[in-house]
Image (cartoon, rainbow, N blue to C red):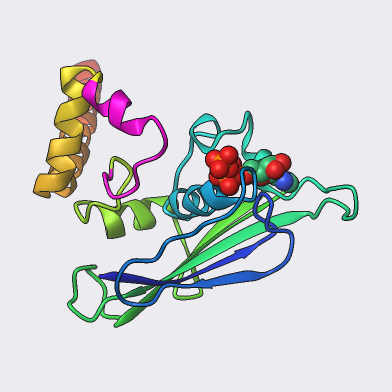
Amino acid sequence: MVLKRIELNGFKSFADKTEILLSPGVTVIVGPNGSGKSNVSDAIRWVLGEQSARSLRGSKMEDVIFAGSERRKPVGMAEVSIHLDNDQGKLPVEYREVLVTRRVYRSGESDYLLNRSTCRLRDIHELFADTGLGREGISIIGQGRVDEVLSSRPEERRAFIEEAAGIVKYRNRKNDALKKMEDTQNHIVRVEDIIDELE
Ligand code: ATP
């Protein structure tokens, strides 16, 4: 799986539509302080479903929308898309090229799209679970993150290892199944109560 292209539009300092093409090999983004380098990695984490505004260096999710500058008015929507080459089928979908898009409006409305069709955040999480690009993924290491990982609690460190080992998907399914069993058990208790009342 290769990240081939990133498109940003209205995201943080990227007021206009901006395309970043990533050629095979190493790509380095250079620029003066404050020119938006970290905003690119924030954009990748955001499109992959990051829910914490704080970890995107803001205080609320609206902070990812271009807030205006001396010469430009603020915009009403932020959109980020990433294009991934899925030739090797690492992502569990039939597409050979996977396009993931996330949008947020100032009204708070937001959308996720998978190859231009609306999907749920859960679909994005499931798509990337165990690929290393997921929520707990270790493919994006922000400034200070190495220290954070080293000093994290054992349970948090275990989550990184689980993601790398590819078992997150099964843990999530197990949790869903346990929840269903609990709901079913509650229904059984309720049905038994009704039967008792009727007898
Ligand atoms: P450094 O080299 O110092 O780490 P950097 O190149 O990584 O800097 P970023 O942190 O990516 O820079 O970008 C910071 C810039 O993005 C700041 O100028 C900030 O004003 C701008 N910025 C962040 N959010 C928004 C927003 N919502 N609207 C407009 N500009 C924004």
Label count reads: 0
State the image quarter where residue 89 is shown. bottom left
Residue 108 visible? The answer is: no
Q: Is residue 85 above or below residue 150?
A: below
Q: Quadrant of ligand 1?
A: top right
Q: Residue at the spot x=25%, y=23% of the render?
A: 190
Q: Residue at the spot x=57%, y=72% of the render?
A: 19
Q: In the rendering, at what x and y percent does residue 111 appear?
A: 57, 57
Q: Is residue 82 left or right of residue 176?
A: right
Q: In the rendering, at what x and y percent does residue 52 appear?
A: 49, 34
Q: In the rendering, at what x and y percent does residue 1 appear?
A: 25, 70
State the image quarter where residue 158 is shown. top left
Q: Is residue 123 above or below residue 85?
A: above
Q: Residue at the spot x=36%, y=57% of the render?
A: 123
Q: Residue at the spot x=52%, y=66% of the render?
A: 81
Q: Is residue 117 left or right of residue 151?
A: right
Specify the quadrant that holds the C terminus: top left
State the image quarter where residue 172 is shown. top left
Q: Is residue 186 left or right of residue 53?
A: left
Q: Is residue 47 above or below residue 33?
A: below
Camera-nearest residue between 64 and 178:
64
Q: In the rendering, at what x and y percent does residue 47 appear?
A: 48, 55
Residue 136 visible? The answer is: yes
Camera-nearest residue between 139 and 144:
144
- What's drawn in magenta, residue-wise? 137-150
Q: Is residue 137 left or right of residue 66?
A: left
Whether residue 149 appears in magenta in the rendering, the answer is yes
Whether residue 134 appears in magenta in the rendering, the answer is no
